[in-house]
Image (spheres, rainbow, N blue to C red):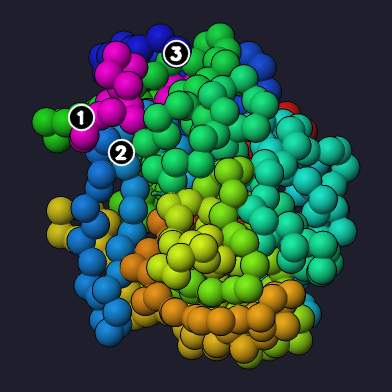
Amino acid sequence: MFPIINHTDAAAQDWDMVIAGSSFAAMFFLRGLPEGLRVLVVEKGPLLLDAPIRASRDRGLEEFAQDNRSDHRKLWVAHSVFGGNSNCWWGQTPRFHPSDFELFERYGQAAPWPLDYGTLEPYYSEVEALMGIAGGDSDHLLPRSSPFPFPAHQVSRSDAACIAAQPEYWVPCPTARSNGADRGQCCANAICDRCPVDAKYTILNGFSAFDRPDVWLLPETELWDVQFAGRQTRAVTIRDTSGALVEIPTRAVGLGANGIFNAAILLRSGLEHAALGRFLHEQGSDTHEIDIAHEGYFGGTTITAHCYGAYDGPHRREAGAVLMETLNAPASIRLEPGRWTDRMHIKFIAEDIPQAENRIELARDGSAQVIWHGHHDYVAAGLAHAAEILPRLLPFEIEGWARGPRSLTEAHIQGTHRMGTDPNSAVTDAQSRVHGYDGLYALGAGNFPTSSPANPTLTLAALSLMAGRSLAS
Ligand SMILES: Cc1cc2nc3c(=O)[nH]c(=O)nc-3n(C[C@H](O)[C@H](O)[C@H](O)COP(=O)(O)OP(=O)(O)OC[C@H]3O[C@@H](n4cnc5c(N)ncnc54)[C@H](O)[C@@H]3O)c2cc1C
């Protein structure tokens, strides 16, 4: 673990880089930085090493002030603790589809990305190797330069039949729930947020990839704002648990505090940009229990397959791409004798169109406040499109279909400092550098100009690694 430093000693030094946060965005950025830099990691939450974090009741769950103007309950989930949400994520690791980086160019929706799939591909491969991802047989959808580090988990029996019937759409799910990595083997218990066998990749169990000389940790300390000399980063202000503020000199800053807190830090720092804090978004989802004339659940891992049949296509002019996940556990059992497992439990995850009115504002005390007007109609249209075509994607007779409610959250905080080549419409560039400022990086899914239906973490980690590497060039 990094050596711990106190506020007084940290303030007495001139740092090359101060990083806010210690989760995916922060640590993969650190991993990419050139050697020889003196780095201070400022982490708002505690470092919990003695008490296993999965057993700890208080993992620093944040309560966000939210003015929800939609007709749907909405939650945003973040934990302030060393390793952030890496401690509780579920380890779903699909790459974005190549079309996700071209939604604007192909379908006239949302805003353009400043990079394409091919540019990010080597970083995807590197992050997958570091996380020990298990996966396979998806190269035709998501081209790769190197094989998956570990083979895919065994899929359920209904997945296997779907893959055999339509391999162009159905693939085993790539995941950071171990299938051979040097962690426990996934046991498909469906309590992944507190994985009892440490099968899931976390920043703590993968820490050796980030450990390096000349990095110090300041835990239980909030990075409050960034100070500039003209447009050059010169210091950060940190705040301890008592609220005391201390200035720490630094030449550069990497904000890896997630989209909500990154935006709050930049707003408190006095940055003015029409897109800053805006375009907060995430996917919308619902779940389906489909009774089929075929056996379903079987060992493997918690979520076993992905279906891309409702993902890319001309429908994206009006309706969001949908990624379908088949849930293997917890089992949803049919009640007829002898038919218990003849069911598929499928989650539809639809991409959203980021909207400017969904935003972060600062409350009077400087804390982040979410203003939420709801998802774009694109989400509902995407979910409806997926439900319409699902029967064509299943090689079984459908005997029953129960649709669950729309989810309250995907726990994906995206938007708020979107990237792009045009400094007038985008806050950051392709390397996560804030346009117009020297030495200021805003990392993570806050950079996403479009949502993709795919889970964000692999992509945000790859973008952060690329951003760190850019300092060497
Ligand atoms: C239950 C759950 C399941 C999930 N499952 C998946 C999944 O299967 N696949 C997937 O792709 N994604 C999943 N996610 C989302 C995933 O966890 C996030 O995308 C990811 O953690 C974001 O990484 P991050 O580094 O940007 O931010 P975070 O993980 O949110 O970490 C932010 C870090 O910054 C620190 N911090 C905050 N404010 C400050 C400040 N002012 N100063 C200093 N430090 C600060 C925090 O303490 C924390 O360490 C899941 C999330 C949850 C909650």
Residue at position x 59%, y 49% from top? 298
| CB of mark 2 near ligand 1 (< 8 Å) | yes
The residue at which mark 3 appears reads as 2
Query: What segment carries the magenta color?
Result: 39-58
Distance from disc 2 to disc 1, alpha carbons, whole Å, reads 14 Å
For this view, does 8 lie left or right of residue 176? Answer: left
Q: Could you say whether the residue bearing mark 3 is in a helix, strand or loop? A: loop
Pointer 2 local density, CA inside 10 Å: few below 14, some 14–19, many at least 20: many
Residue 402 is inside the magenta segment: no
Pointer 3 local density, CA inside 10 Å: few below 14, some 14–19, many at least 20: some
Q: Nearer the viewer, mark 2 or mark 1?
A: 2
Residue at position x 54%, y 34% from top? 186
Q: Amino acid at mark 3?
A: Phe
Mark 3–mark 2 CB contact (< 8 Å): no
Residue at position x 48%, y 51% from top? 329
Q: Amino acid at mark 2?
A: Ser
Name the image quarter holding the N terminus.
top left
The residue at which mark 1 appears reads as 240
Mark 2–mark 1 CB contact (< 8 Å): no
Q: 179 or 265, which is in the foreground?
A: 179
Check residue 352 in the rendering and tell me which mark sits there, or answer none.
none
Mark nearer the N terminus (3 vs 2): 3
Residue 464 vs 326, above or below: the answer is above
Dividing the image into four equal quarters, which quarter contains ligand 1?
A: top left
Q: Main secondary structure of the magenta part?
A: loop
| CB of mark 1 near ligand 1 (< 8 Å) | no
Check residue 80 in the rendering and tell me which mark sits there, or answer none.
2
**Residue sitting at the far left:** 242
Distance from disc 1 to disc 3, alpha carbons, whole Å, reads 19 Å
The image position of residue 110, as x and y in percent, is: 61, 78
Mark nearer the N terminus (2 vs 1): 2
Q: Nearer the viewer, mark 1 or mark 3?
A: 3
